[in-house]
Amino acid sequence: MLWKGLLGIHNVAQSTAPSANTYDGSGFRSGAVGALDEYAFQFVAAGTYYYVCEAHAAMGMKGVVIVQDPSPVPSPTWTADSAGPPIAKALPAQNPNPTALAVQLKRGVDKLTLKIYSAAMAVVAQQELGSCGPGWQTLPLPAAFLAQAPNGTYYFVVVAQSASGSSRINGLGSLVILR
Ligand SMILES: [Cu+2]
């Protein structure tokens, strides 16, 4: 909080209540009444803070600062998700003409397989990435596909596999080649 003195002599001093006209003796205070330039005070705890100008409190020069806790930041619940699909998101790194996909994994997997389909749903390229940890992974698009694919819209799936043999196809989307 920043108070600026624009005209006259004032100060800022914490008080105990809206009715109080004096410094509470222990709270924040800009100093003695004087030509107040600027006074900054950082509130670090939620609460209701009353303050006065000691010279002019009786005339009503007082105020209140209400500090609230920040909205709780939702914790990422997906880290504890060990049973659901491992792929949270699979997106082209850019569109059109991506050179890679960005794949967000909720947990580590043993193998990721990318399959790219033409608009007619024929497989035109396939690429594997070995074991991957959780978080965002970069899955490069096959160089041959990038070099030879005609302009158009393509569809992809990302298959996540674990050592136990289970596989989940839950990353899919489209990408555009336009040169
Ligand atoms: Cu004042």
Image (cartoon, rainbow, N blue to C red):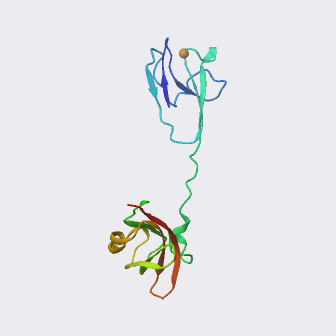
- Outermost top residue: 8
Instruction: Give the image quadrant in which the ligand numbered 1 is located.
Output: top right
The correct choice, above or below, for 69 with respect to 111 in the image is above
Quadrant of residue 65 within the rendered picture: top right
Q: Which quadrant, please, contains the C terminus? A: bottom left
Q: Position of residue 6 (x, y in %)?
A: 48, 16
Furthest toward the bottom, the residue is 165
Above or below, comparing residue 7 to residue 102 in the picture: above
Rendered residue at 51%/77% (across/down): 121
Can residue 90 be seen here? The reply is no
- Residue in view at x 33 percent, y 70 percent: 147
The answer to whether residue 70 shows anywhere in this view is yes
Give the answer, above or below, for where 63 lies relative to 123.
above
What residue is shown at x 64% (from left), y 29% (from top)?
17
Total numbered labels: 0
Determine the residue located farthest toward the right in the rendered image: 19
Residue 29 in the image: state x and y as whole percent.
49, 26
Residue 61 x %, y %: 60, 18
- Along the line of sight, the residue nearer the viewer: 6 or 101: 101
Residue at the image position 35 percent from the left and 69 percent from the top: 146
Q: Looking at this view, is 43 or 168 the one in front?
A: 168
Q: Nearer the viewer, residue 146 or 51?
A: 146
